[in-house]
Protein backbone atom coordinates (compact mmCIF):
# COMPACT_ATOMS: atom_id res chain seq x y z
CA UNK A 1 0.00 0.00 0.00
CA UNK A 2 1.47 3.37 -1.05
CA UNK A 3 1.19 6.42 1.19
CA UNK A 4 0.81 10.04 0.14
CA UNK A 5 3.03 12.76 1.62
CA UNK A 6 0.10 13.82 3.80
CA UNK A 7 0.22 10.45 5.55
CA UNK A 8 -2.96 8.97 4.07
CA UNK A 9 -2.98 6.04 1.64
CA UNK A 10 -2.96 6.87 -2.10
CA UNK A 11 -5.75 5.76 -4.33
CA UNK A 12 -5.05 3.72 -7.44
CA UNK A 13 -5.46 6.72 -9.72
CA UNK A 14 -3.11 8.83 -7.54
CA UNK A 15 -0.49 6.03 -7.48
CA UNK A 16 -0.73 5.66 -11.28
CA UNK A 17 -0.35 9.43 -11.74
CA UNK A 18 2.69 9.51 -9.38
CA UNK A 19 4.28 6.54 -11.19
CA UNK A 20 3.74 8.24 -14.55
CA UNK A 21 5.32 11.46 -13.22
CA UNK A 22 8.36 9.59 -11.88
CA UNK A 23 8.84 7.69 -15.15
CA UNK A 24 8.55 10.86 -17.25
CA UNK A 25 10.99 12.86 -15.14
CA UNK A 26 13.59 10.19 -14.40
CA UNK A 27 13.59 8.10 -17.56
CA UNK A 28 13.31 10.71 -20.30
CA UNK A 29 15.11 9.65 -23.49
CA UNK A 30 16.11 13.24 -24.25
CA UNK A 31 18.28 13.44 -21.11
CA UNK A 32 21.94 13.74 -22.14
CA UNK A 33 24.23 10.93 -21.12
CA UNK A 34 26.77 12.20 -18.64
CA UNK A 35 30.36 11.40 -19.57
CA UNK A 36 33.14 11.09 -17.01
CA UNK A 37 36.77 11.74 -17.92
CA UNK A 38 38.97 8.65 -17.86
CA UNK A 39 42.29 10.50 -17.68
CA UNK A 40 43.73 13.83 -16.69
CA UNK A 41 46.65 15.72 -18.18
CA UNK A 42 48.31 18.44 -16.17
CA UNK A 43 49.66 21.05 -18.59
CA UNK A 44 50.89 23.41 -15.91
CA UNK A 45 54.58 24.39 -16.27
CA UNK A 46 57.21 22.47 -14.34
CA UNK A 47 58.53 24.46 -11.38
CA UNK A 48 62.07 25.84 -11.48
CA UNK A 49 62.91 24.10 -8.21
CA UNK A 50 61.36 21.36 -6.09
CA UNK A 51 59.81 18.09 -7.19
CA UNK A 52 60.15 17.21 -10.87
CA UNK A 53 58.69 14.33 -12.88
CA UNK A 54 60.77 11.15 -13.26
CA UNK A 55 63.30 10.96 -16.08
CA UNK A 56 63.98 7.76 -17.99
CA UNK A 57 67.51 6.51 -17.34
CA UNK A 58 69.17 4.22 -19.81
CA UNK A 59 70.39 0.85 -18.55
CA UNK A 60 74.07 0.28 -19.32
CA UNK A 61 75.08 -2.87 -17.47
CA UNK A 62 78.66 -4.01 -17.58
CA UNK A 63 79.30 -7.74 -17.34
CA UNK A 64 82.68 -8.75 -15.91
CA UNK A 65 84.97 -10.47 -18.39
CA UNK A 66 85.29 -13.62 -16.29
CA UNK A 67 81.47 -14.00 -16.11
CA UNK A 68 81.14 -13.61 -19.88
CA UNK A 69 83.96 -16.11 -20.41
CA UNK A 70 82.36 -18.73 -18.18
CA UNK A 71 79.00 -18.19 -19.88
CA UNK A 72 80.51 -18.70 -23.33
CA UNK A 73 82.46 -21.73 -22.12
CA UNK A 74 79.28 -23.24 -20.64
CA UNK A 75 77.49 -22.82 -23.96
CA UNK A 76 80.40 -24.47 -25.75
CA UNK A 77 80.45 -27.35 -23.28
CA UNK A 78 76.71 -27.83 -23.70
CA UNK A 79 77.01 -27.90 -27.48
CA UNK A 80 79.95 -30.31 -27.28
CA UNK A 81 78.14 -32.67 -24.92
CA UNK A 82 75.10 -32.57 -27.19
CA UNK A 83 77.30 -33.46 -30.17
CA UNK A 84 78.91 -36.32 -28.27
CA UNK A 85 75.51 -37.58 -27.19
CA UNK A 86 74.14 -37.44 -30.73
CA UNK A 87 77.21 -39.24 -32.05
CA UNK A 88 76.89 -41.98 -29.44
CA UNK A 89 73.22 -42.33 -30.21
CA UNK A 90 73.89 -42.69 -33.94
CA UNK A 91 76.62 -45.27 -33.36
CA UNK A 92 74.52 -47.31 -30.98
CA UNK A 93 71.19 -47.00 -32.81
CA UNK A 94 71.71 -50.17 -34.79
CA UNK A 95 71.92 -52.30 -31.67
CA UNK A 96 68.52 -53.62 -30.62
CA UNK A 97 69.34 -53.60 -26.91
CA UNK A 98 70.18 -49.90 -26.84
CA UNK A 99 67.54 -47.72 -25.17
CA UNK A 100 67.40 -44.00 -24.59
CA UNK A 101 68.26 -44.48 -20.91
CA UNK A 102 71.39 -46.44 -21.76
CA UNK A 103 72.54 -43.73 -24.21
CA UNK A 104 71.99 -41.11 -21.56
CA UNK A 105 73.96 -43.14 -19.03
CA UNK A 106 76.85 -43.53 -21.51
CA UNK A 107 77.04 -39.78 -22.21
CA UNK A 108 76.67 -38.74 -18.57
CA UNK A 109 80.40 -39.17 -17.75
CA UNK A 110 81.32 -36.99 -20.75
CA UNK A 111 79.03 -34.22 -19.51
CA UNK A 112 80.52 -34.43 -16.02
CA UNK A 113 84.06 -34.35 -17.41
CA UNK A 114 83.27 -31.31 -19.56
CA UNK A 115 81.71 -29.42 -16.63
CA UNK A 116 84.70 -30.23 -14.43
CA UNK A 117 87.10 -29.01 -17.16
CA UNK A 118 85.14 -25.74 -17.42
CA UNK A 119 85.21 -25.21 -13.66
CA UNK A 120 88.94 -25.97 -13.44
CA UNK A 121 89.71 -23.66 -16.38
CA UNK A 122 87.71 -20.82 -14.80
CA UNK A 123 89.45 -21.30 -11.45
CA UNK A 124 92.91 -21.32 -13.06
CA UNK A 125 92.05 -18.22 -15.08
CA UNK A 126 90.92 -16.32 -11.99
CA UNK A 127 93.92 -17.49 -9.96
CA UNK A 128 96.36 -16.38 -12.64
CA UNK A 129 94.78 -12.95 -12.97
CA UNK A 130 94.88 -12.42 -9.19
CA UNK A 131 98.65 -12.97 -8.87
CA UNK A 132 100.62 -9.76 -9.05
CA UNK A 133 104.39 -9.44 -9.03
CA UNK A 134 105.76 -6.19 -7.68
CA UNK A 135 109.48 -5.84 -8.16
CA UNK A 136 111.01 -2.73 -6.68
CA UNK A 137 114.52 -1.82 -7.67
CA UNK A 138 116.44 1.25 -6.72
CA UNK A 139 117.30 3.27 -3.64
CA UNK A 140 114.68 4.00 -1.01
CA UNK A 141 114.68 7.47 0.58
CA UNK A 142 112.69 8.23 3.70
CA UNK A 143 111.96 11.90 4.36
CA UNK A 144 110.59 12.97 7.69
CA UNK A 145 110.04 16.64 6.97
CA UNK A 146 106.61 17.27 5.47
CA UNK A 147 105.08 20.55 4.32
CA UNK A 148 101.42 19.53 4.14
CA UNK A 149 98.67 21.40 2.30
CA UNK A 150 95.20 19.83 2.59
CA UNK A 151 92.05 20.75 0.62
CA UNK A 152 88.64 19.22 1.38
CA UNK A 153 85.68 19.61 -0.98
CA UNK A 154 82.16 18.29 -0.76
CA UNK A 155 79.56 17.88 1.91
CA UNK A 156 78.19 14.34 1.88
CA UNK A 157 80.79 12.70 -0.28
CA UNK A 158 83.86 14.65 0.73
CA UNK A 159 87.15 14.43 -1.12
CA UNK A 160 90.36 15.39 0.59
CA UNK A 161 93.48 16.16 -1.40
CA UNK A 162 96.81 16.25 0.36
CA UNK A 163 99.64 18.01 -1.43
CA UNK A 164 102.97 17.10 0.16
CA UNK A 165 105.90 19.31 -0.72
CA UNK A 166 109.45 18.71 0.49
Image (spheres, grey):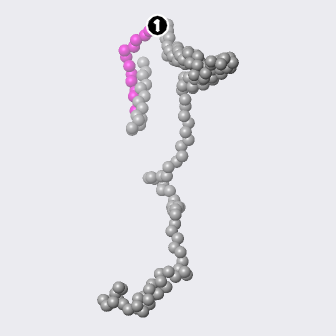
Regarding mark 1 in the picture, which secondary structure is present there?
A: loop
Q: Is residue 114 visible?
A: no
Observer-nearest of 96 and 93 = 96
- Quarter holding the C terminus? top left
Magenta span = 138-152
Q: Is residue 147 visible?
A: yes
* Residue found at x 35% / y 85%: 1
* Residue sitting farthest toward the top: 138
Q: Is residue 148 left or right of residue 113?
A: left
Observer-nearest of 8 and 81 = 8
Q: Please tell me whether residue 134 is drawn above or below residue 9 in the rendered image.
A: above
Characterize the local packing of mark 1: few (<14), some (14-19) or many (20 or more) Cα atoms within 10 angstroms.
few
* Residue sitting farthest toward the left: 7
Image coordinates for residue 29, horizontal then vertical, percent: 54, 80
* Residue found at x 49% / y 7%: 138
Image coordinates for residue 76, horizontal then vertical, percent: 62, 22
Q: Is residue 110 magenta?
A: no
Observer-nearest of 116 and 88 = 88
Image coordinates for residue 14, horizontal then vertical, percent: 40, 91
* Residue sitting farthest toward the front: 96
Name the residue that disc number 1 marks.
139
* Residue found at x 55% / y 39%: 59
Q: Is residue 54 left or right of residue 80?
A: left
* Residue found at x 42% / y 22%: 164
Q: How many marks?
A: 1
Image coordinates for residue 8, horizontal then vertical, percent: 31, 90
Q: Quadrant of residue 12?
A: bottom left
Q: Is residue 150 magenta?
A: yes
User: What is the magenta segment's predominant secondary structure?
Assistant: loop
Q: Quadrant of residue 92?
A: top right
Q: Please tell me whether residue 11 is drawn above or below residue 51 in the rendered image.
A: below
Amino acid sequence: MDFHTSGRPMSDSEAAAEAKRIIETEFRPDQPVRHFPTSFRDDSPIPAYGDTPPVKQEDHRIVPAWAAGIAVASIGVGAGVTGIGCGAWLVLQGLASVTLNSVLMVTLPFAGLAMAATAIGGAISRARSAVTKNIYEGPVTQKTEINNHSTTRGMFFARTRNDIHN
